[in-house]
Amino acid sequence: MAGKDEQDIMPKMEMLISRMLLGGVIVSMATVLVGLVLMFVHHPEDLRTADNLKRLTSPGASFPHTVADVARGVAAGRGKAIVALGLAILIATPILRVAIAMIGFAIERDRVLSAVSAIVLILLALAFMLGTVD
Amino acid sequence: MIGVTAAASAGVYFARGDVDPIIAAPVALGVVLGAVAGSKVLGKIDSRVLRIVFVLILMIVAAQMIWKGVM
């Protein structure tokens, strides 16, 4: 059975992770919503006809997807970049969740589970690097 | 909303520029709103009603997919 310390910290960590996941979704959805509204406020002509709206998602449409592009676009207040930032936050949320679990297990001195969390993090980083190399 | 395994591939797609924010944003918003509303409604609704609504929605989606595939 779990010792006294573990009993104290486990629910706390689960609460922290649950709040963090919920917070990540709320923050990212709010960011996406602000970006979408801003996009159509800046370019109201996109909403005027169905054809204009369709052109937004045409295969040739450009949108920011690198850190530098997104940062520059957000700084300039561009809606599309803010939407991209929101989606990036959404993608980053579960990765952050693994990092928090790893720290939590380390505080608990659970060597096995913190090592597993670290391996998951390393594999995520490896997958990302392999996937983005051309 | 995104699982740990899906985050690995989602991050790669995003970095490669394969995630069009204009397509992904309404999908993400719809999933969140639907999940929140669904979990609230699920406890109150009769399971028979739910089944019928679900079948109807699946049939509409199926018809739409066939329509888009053929036309």
Image (tube, coloured by chain):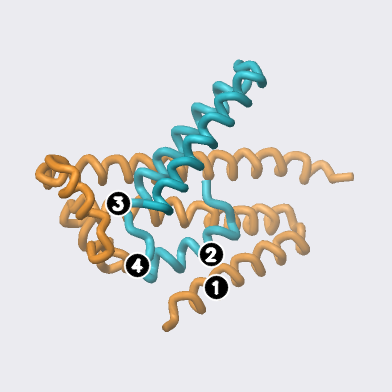
Chain colours: A orange, B cyan
Chain of the residue that carries numbered disc 4 in the rendered image:
B
Q: Which amino acid does label 1 sit on?
A: Ala
Q: Which amino acid does label 2 sit on?
A: Ala
Q: What element carries label 4?
A: loop
Residue at left offset 33%, top offset 45%: A32
On the rendered structure, is A65 left or right of A107?
A: left
Identify the residue at the far left of this view. A45
Q: Are marks 3 and 1 in contact (CB under 8 Å)?
A: no
Chain of the residue that carries numbered disc 2 in the rendered image:
B
Q: Are marks 1 and 2 in contact (CB under 8 Å)?
A: yes
Q: Nearer the viewer, residue B7 or B18?
A: B18
Q: Nearer the viewer, residue A41 or A4?
A: A41
Q: Which amino acid does label 4 sit on?
A: Gly
Identify the residue at the far front of this view. B70
Chain of the residue that carries numbered disc 3 in the rendered image:
B
Q: Is mark 1 on a helix, strand or loop?
A: helix
